[in-house]
Amino acid sequence: MATAQSNGHTDGQGFAVPIESASFARDDGDVVVVIGSGAGGGTLAGELCQQGINTVVLEAGPHLTGPDYENDEWPAFNQMAWLDNRTTSGSWRVAKDFPNLPAWTVKAVGGTTTHWAGACPRFKDYEFKVKSEYGGGLDGANLADWPIGLADLEPYYDKAEVKMGVTHRHGRPALPANNNYKVFANGADRVGYTGYATGPYATNAEPYDDRPASIQDGFNFQGDKNGSKWSPLVSDLPKAGQTGNLDLRPECQAVQITHDSSNRVDGVLYLDSDGNLHHQRASAVCVACNAIETARLLLLSASPSHPDGLANSSGQVGRNYMRHTTGSVYARFDQPVKMWRGETMAGIVTDEAGHDPDRGFAGGYYMETLALGPPFLAAFVEPGSWGPDFTAIMDAYERTAGLWITGEDMPQETNRVTLNTGVADEHGLPVPNVHFDDHPNDAAMREHAWARGEAMYDAVGATGAHRTTPYPSTHNMGTARMSERAEDGVVNAFGQAHDVANLFVSDGSQFTSGAAANPTLTIVALAIRQAEYIGEQVRTGGV
Amino acid sequence: MAEVATTGTADATVLRALTDMVRAMFPHPSFPDGPYERCAQTILDATVGDLRFRTQLHQGLRDLDSIGGAPFAQLDAGAKLDLLRGISNTEFFEGVRSRVITSLYDDREVWSLLGYEGPSFAQGGYAQRGFADLDWLPDPRIEEAS
């Protein structure tokens, strides 16, 4: 049989690699069950399979591939976005503008890596110890230091970057400048920034990992039909399938993690595509459903012996929800930009990504290029807007450049995912409610970042600029945080639940703090590290 | 007044009234009538499965012709905007506005009018078609600062 990689093809319809799936028995209690197939779950499952561990992946969404993806924003969104009902509360503007869409995540094999752009900065050392570094003056922030530091993660960052083919790293070449980057980088240069580049970015500038180079089609938010962007869908899962150790079950949504009488989890109840309820036995369960659904599933898994939800003796499950301090600047020029051409986010400015309290806030932020098509720009540039001010923004579309801000936001106990028992999903289960209020530090950082983004564009001749409010969250973190002590968080330094030894959290939920960096690289690095740990536990009988 | 409420289908009067409203809300000097008419038709078509919006639209369009002291179509652009601002907090207005956002700008002719090129994968993306053709700024460094 050919290798999975050589089966990948682009035939004019889009890149697709078959994923061989074993079929393990539902009463096979030796398998590890991974819930979710995105950056965390997909990576973890791949690594476990490579170690010879039989792994069942339950993925709520369908198995879409390159030929399925659409170069068209609304059809693509409706095809892959997680659109199950959710509710919102709090003072964040998303609750008013998009009350049932707190987050923009993906329900498909590959999870939200289907939609992610590819930006891959690492965390900085201080970002693992924010309680120590930031000191007081941040009332309301539930700051804690991570139980690990940068040195613990560096070898895994290396492995993650090699796996993902990150540009500017380990010999991978940089992507070329596209039009949006030319405006962005020249502006950065003219305001005195030096930290601009087209990456690190997990999309091939030249063929790598048996996937082609970018064709600069401008649709990697819509799944990347060309297969140039790393995701578990096109890399880890096909390779895992070749081991014979992967049982991938798309359209299977976990609804409860079950446990035995000795405080160990022993399986997962899930619904198949026909709505039939099944129980898969497991030796260990790894939850990687993105921060909202991970918290929801742990809370849904409440039982008489875990009345507040599974692994929730600390009361921290669902709390400390973080979404990054975000926003955009869209600037207009006299001459054409055509920002939609080329890689969506292959441009980064790092100069503001550091802790400099003289700016009036703790933590730092990145600015990254961002382009939307007219359908999404209309929906998100100024939600609720209409009239001549709005149409002037749209009329300048061809002459517009865009950037996105991603910065550290403060964990707060009251920013929280809870079960909304008054609203049921299509299966009758309570939907998640996402409550969020900006911390004053978040608001101060956003104001600073908007001003600096405008300054960059002013420096290259912008005739006007619009400050765009945060979109529905794509970076969802913190709802099952790592902590040194069991009373302070949900999982330990390996993502292992403090309360339940064979239960793991494997996505951004385990972040103790959010840092400034786009979270995917760190989720992947943590998943590789966690897979090693689980492998040891399996071999030594700990799991 | 045509009966949006009873038939759920658009006759010419309703379509014209809604088209006028959409154009007044989202005035693009370069747009011909076609995109506005298609947008209005899309909104009317969607009322079939949405009784609440159908009823809101039925009464709301009638109100447009009375609030300004003259039929909406006979008001000048400034008066139309003033009228719309006055009702912008209503369910009727927001129902129309939110539906325009997801339909008017999802129109191929509108994309073309705005300069947007739409799907690109089938044409090989922009790698050979100008992804870096901006020539009014110097080519910046792409590597990280050393």
Image: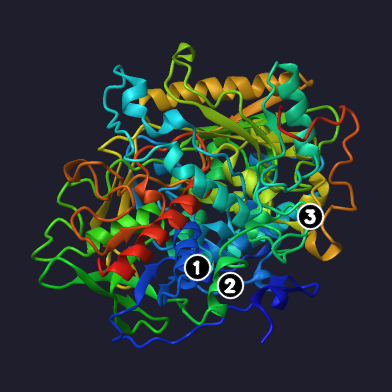
**Tags 2 and 1 in contact by the CB under 8 Å rule?**
yes
Task: Please determine if labels 2 and 1 lie on a single subunit.
Answer: yes
Residue identified by numbered label 1: A46
The chain ID associated with circle 3 is A
In this orientation, which residue lies closer to the viewer: A212 or A449? Answer: A212
- Which quadrant, please, contains the N terminus of chain A? bottom right
Question: Residue A159 appears at what percent x and percent y?
Answer: 55, 52
Quadrant in which residue A459 is drawn: top right
The chain ID associated with circle 2 is A
A287 lies left or right of B62: left
Q: Residues within 10 Å of mark 2 (few under 14, many from 20)?
A: many
A458 lies left or right of A77: right
Nearer-N-terminus badge (1/3): 1
A505 lies left or right of A314: right
* Residue at position x 57%, y 79% in the image: A242
Task: Please determine if labels 1 and 3 lie on a single subunit.
Answer: yes
* Residue at position x 35%, y 44% in the image: A478
Distance between mark 1 and mark 3 Cα atoms: 24 Å
In this orientation, which residue lies closer to the viewer: B106 or A11? Answer: A11
Q: Amino acid at mark 3?
A: Glu
Nearer-N-terminus badge (2/3): 3
Describe the element under mark 3 as helix, strand or loop. loop
Residue identified by numbered label 3: A206
Residue identified by numbered label 2: A239
In this orientation, which residue lies closer to the viewer: A172 or A538? Answer: A538
Question: Residue A481 appears at what percent x and percent y?
Answer: 30, 45
Q: Amino acid at mark 1?
A: Gly
